[in-house]
């Protein structure tokens, strides 16, 4: 099964993607993770991506499409889950020309809770685990002991532009996939396990 995870920044896509990956034989492809990997390695793509990501803007489509095509080839174009892609209609149309998508899961949250969720978010350097700072007793990952850090784009002014970009460019994808008969929306306001229980119902 080939699926897309849709949702605003901070909706919990990454959190749910880890659970889906653990419970289904499906490859997680996160464009944000790929860009962060490039930024750490200081590749040309990473240096270019950083200038957009820091401002909360989308990385240009031609660059994003290139990394997605490579990731899809690596996955053998089957049994994958896209997280953070597509993010606008142009990317969705390009994707339609590359692979067949079976289901699109939209994690639906109230945009008002997102600023706090994102600004309080910490990520593990080692395993990608994310948690709200209020649940951490120190700077150490409860899962693997790695170092927890704050993303460069998780500060308040950047978050504001990310939410604007989401509303203007990404939210229209909900209707796009609804029209294709592929959309399933789940309530993203509950605890991570409650949201995952809803996703299980969709995936079977
Ligand atoms: P979130 O979903 O929390 O906003 P991501 O890790 O998915 O975070 O993405 C972080 C940033 O990486 C985005 O704000 C954007 O700048 C860039 N990015 C990720 N995916 C894409 C994409 N499909 N198209 C353009 N830019 C992207
Ligand atoms: Zn960890």
Image (spheres, rainbow, N blue to C red):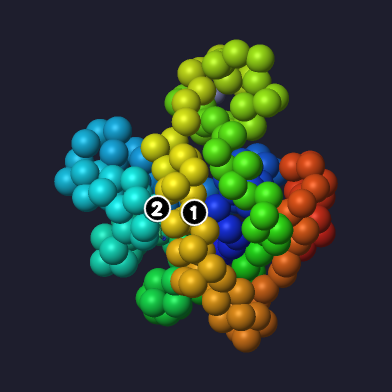
Asked if residue 173 is positioned above or below residue 10 in the image, the reply reads below
Q: Hey, which residue is sitting farthest bottom in the picture?
A: 179
Q: Is residue 1 above or below residue 100?
A: above
Q: CA distance from mark 1 to mark 2?
A: 8 Å
Quarter where residue 151 is shown: top left
Q: Which residue is mark 2?
A: 56
Number of other residues with Cα within 10 Å of mark 2, as a class: few under 14, some 14 to 19, many 20 or more: many
Q: Is mark 1 within 8 Å of ligand 1?
A: no
Q: Could you tell me if the residues under marks 1 and 2 are in contact, i.e. CB atoms within 8 Å? A: yes
Q: Is residue 166 visible?
A: yes
| Residue 139 as seen in the image, left or right of residue 19 | left
Residue depicted at x 34% and y 51%: 55
Whole-percent x and y of residue 97?
40, 79
Q: How many marks?
A: 2
Q: Nearer the viewer, residue 160 or 200?
A: 160
Q: Is residue 55 left or right of residue 159?
A: left
The quadrant the N terminus occupies is: bottom right
Query: Disc 2, ligand 1: is the CB inside 8 Å?
Result: yes
Image quarter (top left, top right, bottom left or bottom right) of the C terminus: bottom right
Other-residue count near label 1 (Cα within 10 Å), few / some / many at <14 / 14–19 / ≥20: some
Q: Residue at x 49, y 43 (%)?
A: 156
The percent coordinates of residue 108 (x first, y second) are 70, 61
Residue 91, placed above or below residue 175: above
The circle drawn on residue 160 is 1
Residue with the most extreme front position? 157
Q: Which mark is residue 65?
A: none
- Helix, strand, or loop for circle 2? loop
Residue at image point 55% right, 53% down = 9
> Looking at this rendering, what residue extends furthest in the left direction?
44
Q: Position of residue 135 (x, y in %)?
A: 70, 25
Of 48 and 24, the residue lying toward us? 48
């Amino acid at each position: 099964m080939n699926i897309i995870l849709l949702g605003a920044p901070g909706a919990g896509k990454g959190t749910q993607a880890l659970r889906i990956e653990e419970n289904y034989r499906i490859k997680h492809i996160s464009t944000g993770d790929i860009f962060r990997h490039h930024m750490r390695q200081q590749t040309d793509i990473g240096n270019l991506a950083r200038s957009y990501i820091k401002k909360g803007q989308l990385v240009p489509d031609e660059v994003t499409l290139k990394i997605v095509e490579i990731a899809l080839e690596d996955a053998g174009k089957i049994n994958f889950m896209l997280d953070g892609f597509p993010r606008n209609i142009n990317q969705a149309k390009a994707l339609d020309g590359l692979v067949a998508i079976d289901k699109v899961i939209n994690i639906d949250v109230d945009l008002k809770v997102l600023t706090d969720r994102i600004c309080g978010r910490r990520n593990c350097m080692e395993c990608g685990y994310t948690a709200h700072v209020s649940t951490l007793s120190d700077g150490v990952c409860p899962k693997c002991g790695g170092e927890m850090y704050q993303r460069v784009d998780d500060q308040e002014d950047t978050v504001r532009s990310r939410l604007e970009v989401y509303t203007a460019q990404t939210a229209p994808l909900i209707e796009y996939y609804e029209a294709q008969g592929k959309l399933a929306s789940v309530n993203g306001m509950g605890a991570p396990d409650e949201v995952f229980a809803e996703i299980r119902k969709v995936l079977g």
